[in-house]
Image (cartoon, rainbow, N blue to C red):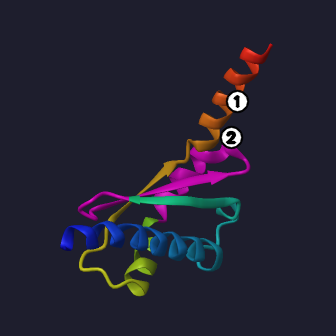
Amino acid sequence: MSKHRGNFQLPRIESEILNILNHTLKYVIYDEKLREVSFTYVKLDPGKTFAHIYVDTFHRENLDKILVKLNESKGVFRRELSQNMQLRKLPEIRFERDETIDRNDAIEAILNQKKN
């Protein structure tokens, strides 16, 4: 029974983390460079030790600099998570580039080549 419960619990926790982090980004962090950022999704490992936070922005050329800034601000995000969630142990946050758009662009380019 607990095996199924854990499977349902992870997506709920990931969703809650995503909501809190996006709220923090919008209302707590006061860095203009981070205003253009959005957290697209969260992936927790099964042990809930690491939370991989996927990041994207309209100005993708700035994404590496933005990831550095986000990692410098990890403490603020962790504080907000600890104040707004009931977890035994808070997962370590890892900000990562969301590659979804890049993969979609690559697939679209391949499909366009095959059409021509």
Q: Is residue 80 magenta?
A: no
Most extreme residue toward the right, as rendered? 116
| Quadrant (top left, top right, bottom left, bottom right) of the C terminus | top right
Q: Earlier in the sequence, mark 1 or mark 2?
A: 2
**Labelled disc at residue 108:** 1
**Labelled disc at residue 38:** none
Residue type beneath disc 2: Glu
Residue type beneath disc 1: Glu
Residue located at (76% from left, 22% from top): 112
Most extreme residue toward the top, as rendered? 116
State which region is magenta.
44-73
Depicted 43 relative to depicted 5: above or below = above
**Labelled disc at residue 61:** 2
Query: Nearest the camera: 71 or 105?
Result: 105
Q: Give residue 33's quadrant in the image.
A: bottom right
- Circle 2 packing at 10 Å, graded few (<14), some (14-19), many (20+), is few
Residue 17 location, x and y as percent? 46, 72
Q: Is residue 68 magenta?
A: yes
Left or right: 96 with respect to 34? left
Q: SS for tag 2?
A: helix
Depicted 80 relative to depicted 99: above or below = below
